[in-house]
Amino acid sequence: MSIQSTVEPVAKLIDELNKLPGIGPKSAARLAFYLLKSPKEQTQALADAITEMKERIVFCSLCFNITEEDPCSICQDTSRDRTKICVVEEPLDVIAIERTNDFKGLYHVLHGALNYMEGVTPQQLKIDELMKRAQAENIEEVILATNATTEGDATAMFINRQLAKMGVRTTRIARGLPMGGDLEYADEVTLSRALEGRREM
Ligand SMILES: [Zn+2]
């Protein structure tokens, strides 16, 4: 066996890891060699978790939350208030808000926040899809619950401008969240208060 063919599987893994966000070539190599030294059960569990996630989880075609069935259980739930949409950055934010038990409307997951420096433009987020929902459905209020970060604020402002043109009422969750804090890390009481204290934009 040549040294080339021995190294190839490692190089391939480094290559794949390097494609992940926030993982540069150095970290990719470090992770690959860590996995190489790990027990087989551990690496198998990781591989299985990735495969299972990809096989079982899809994005809801309406709200873009993660789900095992499309549309998701929240979008399908007829007892929910269909006149309100809460806009969040990531699926974990939906879980955080659901935990408060205070919001009974629908959601819309953007899958990120605007960050022109990093190349995240409105086209990369599910903003067009939100506009279509706001137009087609009977929406009375869109609650912008993006994170209290520069990117989250910029995203909320961008969406607010678009919705204002369409005459849809928008509110922004209150500043109860710590500045720079992600929604998913806020405790239930803080999140509850932030939702309750939301204001017109
Ligand atoms: Zn959904």
Image: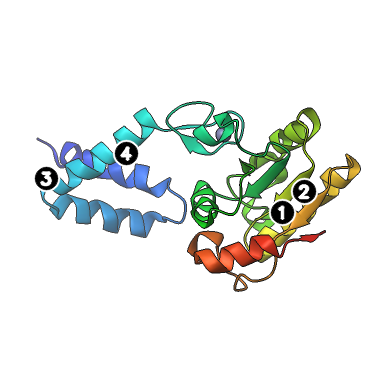
Q: Nearer the N terminus, badge 3 or badge 2?
A: 3
| Residue at x 55%, y 63% (from the top left corner) | 182
- Give the left or right position of residue 35, taking residue 106 as reference: left
Q: Name the residue under label 2.
A: 159
Quadrant where the N terminus is found in the figure: top left
153 with respect to 98 (left or right): right
Q: How far apart are marks 4 and 3 (CA)?
A: 16 Å
Q: Which one is in front, 57 or 124?
A: 57
Mark 4 or mark 1: whose residue is earlier in sequence:
4
Of the residues shown, which amino acid type is indicated by label 1? Thr
Which mark is on residue 50? 4
Q: Which amino acid does label 4 sit on?
A: Ile
- Residue at (66, 47) in percent of width and height: 86
Image disc number at residue 155:
1
Mark 3 residue element? helix
- 124 in relation to 33, above or below: above
- Disc 2 + disc 1, Cβ < 8 Å: yes
Could you give the CA–CA distance between mark 3 and mark 2, rounded to whole angstroms? Answer: 47 Å
Q: Which amino acid does label 2 sit on?
A: Ile
Residue at the location (63% across, 66% down)?
193
